[in-house]
Image: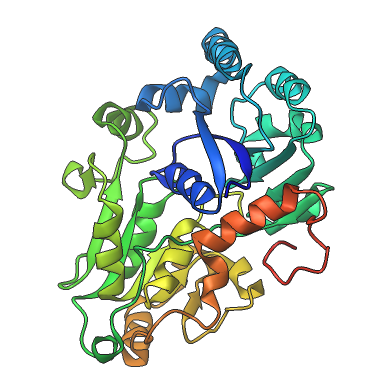
Amino acid sequence: MSTGRALLVSPAFFGYERDIAAELERQGWDTVFVDERPSNSALMRAVIRVRRSLLGRLIQAHYRSTLDRLRRERFDLVVVIKGEVVPAWFLRELRALNPGAAFVFYAYDAVGNSPNCLGLLDQFDARLSFDRDDVEAHAGFGYLPLFHTPEFRPLPAEQAAGSRRHRWAFVGTLHSGRYAFVRRLIGDGEGDFTFFYVQARWYFALTKYVTRENRSVPWRDVSFTPLTRAQIAEVFRHSVAVLDMQRPGQSGLTMRTLEVLASGSILVTTNPSIAQEPFYDPRRVVILPDEGRTTDAAQLLADVVAAGAPAGAPPGFEAYSLESFVRQLVAAGVAGERPGSGRSDRVE
């Protein structure tokens, strides 16, 4: 039996938007998905990030067309994720068409990195963020971490204690000094796995030769084709430890943080806010000060290898699953199930 009709407005982010839509469906919501961006090309993403005003007409046309398609639809739940380019007028008109719907906003990026959402917040019944600093700074926000998907599961117990293919691993997009961070700690050691993804060759050339932020990164160390999620999960569960570095200006736990721990590996991260999570255990999570600049890499490696990879995910880690995330997202917006109503879930 259907719970109701849901509209999900989200940018594409490595297919996770499709997972959220599918989980809404699985939980009984007849779901319509709208891509927040007019296009997901590398050029479009870059222009949105640095000069959104150049795309004003295209964005307005995208949302006018979207609203025309949705005029005859009726929704009980509207979920907007990130709000990078969504116009406020679109939400107002959508609310007028669906006066009984619960409107929920979720941020998986720091507000400072995506400030357009600040002009939208008064359109929502519930506002959630993955970033504890933003929750403290902006009134009305609740805290909801991101999630791990079912692909990220640990090795069977009988294999977990044995040797693993990789001592160290890193998988991520190339930004914010990540290359130097990874190379400081793991170099090119045998048995280590590193993967740096860039969305387009022209974009890497721009950052290497024009802006110079990636001037020291060799072409051979960059891939322009992403790994599949199944490939990433396989790397993580066969690694003793995985490195993670969040973007500057955000304190929220990255998706990689939760995927690594769900895979039964040790997490080595630059994000100190993870110590506030109930699953935090210094035997499973190593927090690096100063982005690892003052860390003795050889000693860190020796300590991690000596500790050995854990057997399984942290206790209670199902609270960070996709299923739990969607359930809490819905609960935050549905009448009578606001955060603070006595539920024992992760929304704070």
Vertical comparison of 261 with 135: above or below: below
Residue at the spot x=55%, y=54% of the render? 27
Instruction: Quadrant for residue 122, please give it.
Output: top right
Image x and y of residue 32, in percent? 52, 33
Residue at the spot x=51%, y=64% of the render? 321
Vertical comparison of 235 with 250: above or below: below
Using the rendered image of the protein, determine whether residue 229 is visible from the camera's viewpoint. yes
Image x and y of residue 342, in percent? 81, 69
Instruction: Quadrant for residue 213, please give it.
Output: top left
Viewer-closest of 222 and 325: 325
Residue at the spot x=39%, y=59% of the render? 181
In the image as oriented, which residue stretches furthest toward the front? Answer: 1
Instruction: Quadrant for residue 212, please give it.
Output: top left
What's the colour scheme? Answer: rainbow
Image x and y of residue 169, in percent? 29, 67
Viewer-closest of 214 and 83: 83
Using residue 224 as the reference point, say whether residue 339 is left or right of it.
Answer: right
Using the rendered image of the protein, determine whether residue 183 is visible from the camera's viewpoint. no
Image x and y of residue 140, in percent? 83, 48
